[in-house]
Amino acid sequence: MGDRSPEPVEETAEELFEEAPCGYLTTLPDGTIVRVNRTFERWTGLDRQRLLGTARFQDLLSAGGRIYHETHYAPMLRMQGAVREIAVEIVCADGSRLPVLVNSQMHHDAQGQPAHVRTTIFDASDRRRYEQELLRARRREQDVALQLQQGMLAGALPAAPGLRVDIGYRPAESGLEIGGDWYDAFWLTPGATVALVVGDVVGRGVGAATMMGQLRSAVRALALTQQGPAAILSALDAYAVRHDVGEMTTLVVAQIDLEDRRLRYACAGHPPPLLVSPRETPRFLLDGRSMPIHVPGGGTAPRPEACCALSPGSRLLLYTDGLIERRSQLIDHGMERLASAVAARQDDPGSTLASALLHELPDPDHPDDLCLLLASV
Amino acid sequence: MTVVARNNVFEHGPRAGQPMLFAHGFGCDQNMWRHVWPAFADRYRVVLFDHVGAGGSDASAFNRDRYASLQGYADDVLEICDELGLTDVIFVGHSVSAMMGVLAAAAEPERFSRLVLVGPSPRYIDEAGYVGGFTREDIDGLLESLDSNYLGWSSAMAPVVMGNADRPELAAELETSFCRADPEIAAHFARTTFLSDNRDDLGRVSTPSLVLQCARDAIAPEVVGRYVHESLPGSVFVQMQATGHCPNLSAPEETIAAIQNFLGG
């Protein structure tokens, strides 16, 4: 007892073929259908009498599927002898569409010439619904992240006699996840001292957007208690390490005293500000540099700052790396390009210059998040 | 980046021979010509390439604006000719590349001596008084499926390399990139291709041309091939026995014979 082999199941080869849990088709190399099983007929409502010898497999597909068949499926089958998991839609007898996954194998005759193609067809309706759900979920997340980012960046910019701030901001194109670039400008002493910030959080999507929000708020809070850009960066670094946020964030903090036109600035791993003084060649401010915020194992390094005087009519440009980076080009080229673009438009109003830089400089082929802040004094 | 690297250009045959430039259509790459070009490499300087985004091309050179019209691809063809110093060119274009050849020849007529257009279509979408073979809804359906069905299309475009017991040399020889493309680039190329309308460009070409028309071609039906023939001054129309849209793969002998006949043996 307990040793009995299972009862043999009575099924013929014909039953296995006709009632298989997938559709079966045999076609000639040009797609003409020469054999089809009952499962396929049942799924599609297409009658074999009207298919055999006349219809081609590609004739049963939606227009998109027919194009895909001619441009991908048939060439791959010829070249590689097989294709698998091709997603197409079959137009059923009642006009409805059946999403299917198709596997095909080419069989050759004794002379090595293509003789016929065997194809299995799997109902992919549920899979298609699942794919569409995934797609909707992804689009929803992109929308949420974008709204989050835009909400956090909203707000009035400081303005006063002798100060104008212009912003250029471009979220990544639709279809790409947003990044964590941010800008900020706020009064330290209303009407007298203004803080300017541009930063870049590593990562993309909702995570990067919320992280950006945290760091942006932290900078605002710290700026009110700390004395100057370098101290703000040190305090932000301690905050980021302590709460383990914003790893490898880069930012530049600048502070302008409007009365004596003094600029103080510090860069944490961030591209250098560009200073444009009237009738002078634009120059990058290369001092006051330290490493990014929250460098793993980075310890506490000194954070220097630098200062310089601003002559009347000067402009200070802060920006994120998307403005100067291009794939397969040195960053120096990007900086040169930025400097000459600014020089060429030295007399443009701030808003015109900001918008021109935003449209002309970024790599058109690899749109990424990007922001710039232009302060005119 | 050189154009040769950008477009993955390969050359065969005698350097001093008359240049014969083969351009592949939407979907695959220069391997589409693998059964055809060897028949010409004894006399002609055969030049093969991949469109940017296809096959072994440099995908980082892809630019949505440049390749938003077939003119961008035609400019690539002219740049290849320029960099290699090709003149007196016989251009052989399959499918959408046939129209790129038309645009290139219209721009630089002195550069080209013959055009061979395999399954050409100057416009895929029907219009009052014109049959292209597809309705606007058909094409929108295709583009929508490219845009939305990303899982399906990405897996469909993933490398499919499998053993072929009957012809093991085939799998080994083939690039793994055959018919594979970045889904976003493929979707963009599809949009450029199937929304193109280059009917007015046909009359700008005086280069002697051959229109090779397959039977039961789902992409470029016979009525479209005839339209191209009638609109191209001095063109020859050849109706092939081959069926489908890719006679270069399914009927290479017939394709070779038709081209040889056109070129004068």
Image: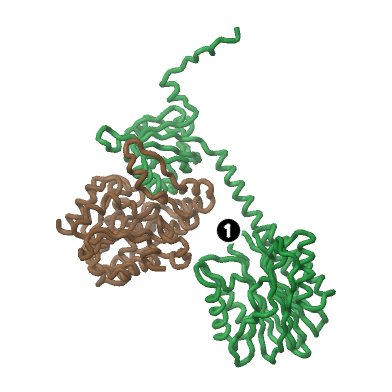
Chain colours: A green, B brown
Percent coordinates x, y for residue B199 in the rendering: 33, 63
Label 1 sits on a secondary structure element that is loop
Locate residue B243: give its quadrant. Answer: top left
Locate residue A201: give its quadrant. Answer: bottom right
Q: Nearer the viewer, residue B257 or B242?
A: B257
Percent coordinates x, y for residue A46 in the rendering: 43, 33
Please tell me which residue is depicted at 70% across the width and 89% down the height of the picture. A310
Mark 1, Cα crowd under 10 Å, few <14 / some 14-19 / many 20+, is: few
Q: State the residue position of label 1.
A: A175
Examine the rendered structure and indicate whether residue A37 appears above or below residue B144: above
Q: Is residue B115 left or right of residue A318?
A: left
Q: Is residue B201 left or right of residue A23?
A: left
Q: Nearer the viewer, residue A34 or A244?
A: A244
- Amino acid type of disc 1? Gly
Percent coordinates x, y for residue B181 in the rendering: 45, 53
Q: Is residue B130 left or right of residue B237?
A: right
Q: Chain of mark 1?
A: A
Please tell me which residue is depicted at 82% across the width and 78% down the height of the picture. A227
Q: Quadrant of the N terminus of chain A?
A: top right
Q: Residue furthest top?
A: A1
Asked whether residue A148 appears in the rendered view, the answer is: no
